[in-house]
């Protein structure tokens, strides 16, 4: 696909996802893609009454203008039809149909998400920081969600160790949340990558964080849950990791103090329980060695 043809497909997808009066949700778009239809074809088939401008050419012009504006803000738009789209996302059924990226886009096939509670204990902070630094030293990309607590500790430690870290946001790239992580987000943008499936100026909502956790699971080779309570949002990522056939690493705290952690540690799943960051590092080394002996199947075709 030529650059101009790819740009047209991106613009059509932006129009379908964000501009149409009856904007298509990702699950509908994924079904269309699986049936072999590209965004331009889907837009051509759309009911004109569903388009804001009632004119497909105007819709594309609007989308092109948005893409140019985002490019001026150093934001790249990634879709499943682009070579830059992270390869690991193609291996799951609920991949994001559009991603906004600021920073260095790579496939990051050796990566681990370190996530956990915002209200975290000193032990949890030390675990996240020690593991983040160790993985950075091992050349493993540290992925997290830029939230307070575990996320911030993991990102910061990876940066201080000179490693690569990726932040997956529950809001748009132009909206910093939490505010105290403004400089941290800026540093990750300069040296790593910040990703979002939400429009650049979009604020976080109660629905956006679960969607972010699902994308973070899909992006990462492994999910590590450092510390969590029974009703922690990290359970969503644990569930997603299992559904995505991604290995899960949880600490003894999670296994002992949450019903879902106890369930996943039962031996029925690809789950490793660790007591220390050193054990977590060793477990991740072993898992990555195992994973890289098997090539993932691409999805969609």
Image (cartoon, rainbow, N blue to C red):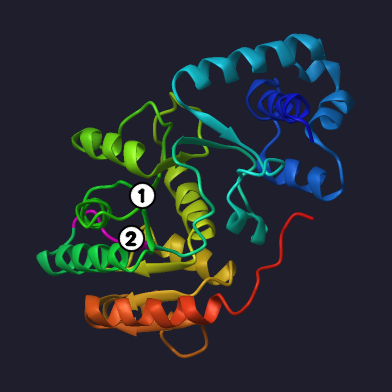
Question: Considering the numbered disc 1 on the image, is that residue within a helix, a strand or a loop?
Answer: loop
Is 74 positioned to the left or the right of 57 in the image?
left
Of the pair 41 and 252, the residue shown nearer to us: 41
Residue 253 in view in this figure: yes
Question: Within the magenta stretch, is there residue 114?
Answer: yes
Residue at coordinates 41% horizontally, 35% vertically from top-left? 171
Residue 62: where, in percent of width, then height? 66, 12
Q: On the image, numbered disc 2 is attached to which residue?
A: 115
The part of the chain drawn in magenta is 113-119
Residue 15: where, in percent of width, then height? 69, 23
Residue 71: where, in percent of width, then height? 52, 21
The quarter of the rendered structure image containing the N terminus is: top right
Question: Within the magenta stretch, is there residue 186?
Answer: no
- The quarter of the picture where residue 238 lies is bottom left
Is 175 positioned to the left or the right of 181 in the image?
right
Residue 260: where, in percent of width, then height? 40, 75
Query: Which label is found at residue 145?
Result: 1
């Amino acid at each position: 696909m030529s650059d101009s043809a790819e740009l047209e497909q991106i613009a059509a997808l932006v129009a379908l996802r964000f501009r149409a009066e009856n904007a298509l949700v990702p699950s509908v778009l994924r079904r269309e893609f699986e049936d072999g239809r590209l965004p331009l074809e889907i837009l051509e088939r759309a009911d004109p009454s569903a388009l804001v401008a009632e004119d497909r050419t105007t819709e594309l012009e609007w989308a092109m203008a948005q893409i140019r504006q985002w490019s001026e803000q150093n934001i790249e738009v990634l879709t499943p039809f682009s070579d830059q789209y992270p390869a690991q996302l193609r291996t799951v059924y609920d991949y994001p149909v559009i991603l906004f990226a600021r920073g260095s886009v790579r496939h990051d096939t050796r990566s681990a998400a370190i996530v956990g509670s915002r209200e975290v204990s000193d032990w949890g902070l030390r675990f996240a920081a020690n593991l983040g630094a160790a993985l950075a030293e091992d050349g493993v990309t540290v992925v997290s969600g830029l939230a307070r607590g575990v996320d911030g500790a993991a990102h910061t430690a990876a940066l201080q160790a000179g490693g690569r870290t990726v932040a997956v946001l529950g809001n748009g790239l132009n909206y910093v949340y939490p505010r105290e992580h403004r400089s941290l987000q800026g540093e990750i943008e300069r040296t790593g990558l910040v990703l979002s499936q939400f429009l650049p100026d979009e604020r976080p909502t109660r629905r956006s964080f679960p969607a972010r956790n699902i994308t973070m699971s899909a992006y990462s080779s492994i999910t590590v849950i450092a510390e969590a309570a029974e009703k922690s949002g990290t359970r969503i990522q644990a569930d997603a990791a299992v559904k995505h056939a991604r290995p899960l690493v949880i600490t003894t705290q999670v296994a002992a103090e949450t019903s879902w952690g106890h369930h996943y540690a039962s031996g029925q799943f690809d789950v490793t329980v660790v007591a220390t960051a050193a054990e977590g590092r060793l477990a991740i080394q072993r898992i990555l060695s195992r994973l890289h002996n098997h090539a993932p199947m691409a999805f969609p075709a």
